[in-house]
Image: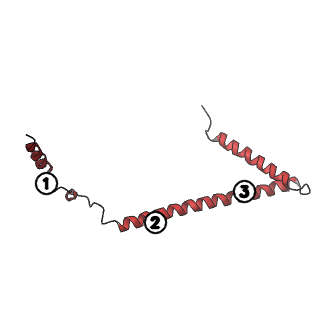
């Protein structure tokens, strides 16, 4: 049985994040202790990632809300154009059986 399908993706993301933090730590001057630099870079990376996620979700929810409002307005303004439903909603005034009989007589 194969493991969790997304476990490999999680491992890859974890490795990339660790490598990114290590590269960021190497950019900090040597006078700063390495554990402090590593923690600082991690906090900055998490802050940026959360900001980007928040911005993306905010934009997505705004677009969905705008589309919902536009659809609601469209339905509200065009409610008279919709068919009402029920037995009297058929556009033909004649009985379908009678109409079929008339067509059959026409081609005899």
41, 108: nearer the viewer: 108
Colour pattern of the rendering? secondary structure
6, 92: nearer the viewer: 92
Q: Is residue 2 above or below residue 55?
A: above
Residue 46 got which mark?
Answer: 3
* Mark 2 lies on residue: 69
Q: Give the side of residue 99 with respect to residue 51, left or right.
A: left
Residue at image coords 80%, 58%: 40
Q: Give the side of residue 64 with respect to residue 3, left or right.
A: left
Q: In what element is the residue under mark 2?
A: helix
Q: Quadrant of residue 9?
A: top right
* Mark 1 lies on residue: 94
**Spatial distance from mark 3 to mark 1, Cα to Cα?**
71 Å
Q: Are marks 3 and 1 in contact (CB under 8 Å)?
A: no
Q: In what element is the residue under mark 1?
A: loop
Q: Nearer the viewer's eye, disc 2 or disc 3?
A: 2
């Amino acid at each position: 049985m194969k493991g969790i399908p997304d476990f490999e993706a999680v491992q890859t993301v974890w490795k990339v994040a660790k490598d990114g933090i290590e590269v960021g730590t190497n950019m900090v001057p040597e006078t700063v202790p390495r554990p402090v630099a590593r923690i600082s870079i991690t906090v900055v990376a998490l802050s940026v990632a959360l900001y980007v996620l928040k911005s993306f979700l905010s934009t997505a929810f705004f677009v969905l809300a705008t589309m919902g409002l536009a659809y609601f307005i469209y339905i509200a303004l065009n409610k008279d154009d919709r068919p009402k439903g029920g037995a009297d909603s058929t556009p033909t005034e004649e009985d379908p059986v009678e109409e079929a009989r008339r067509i059959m007589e026409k081609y005899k």
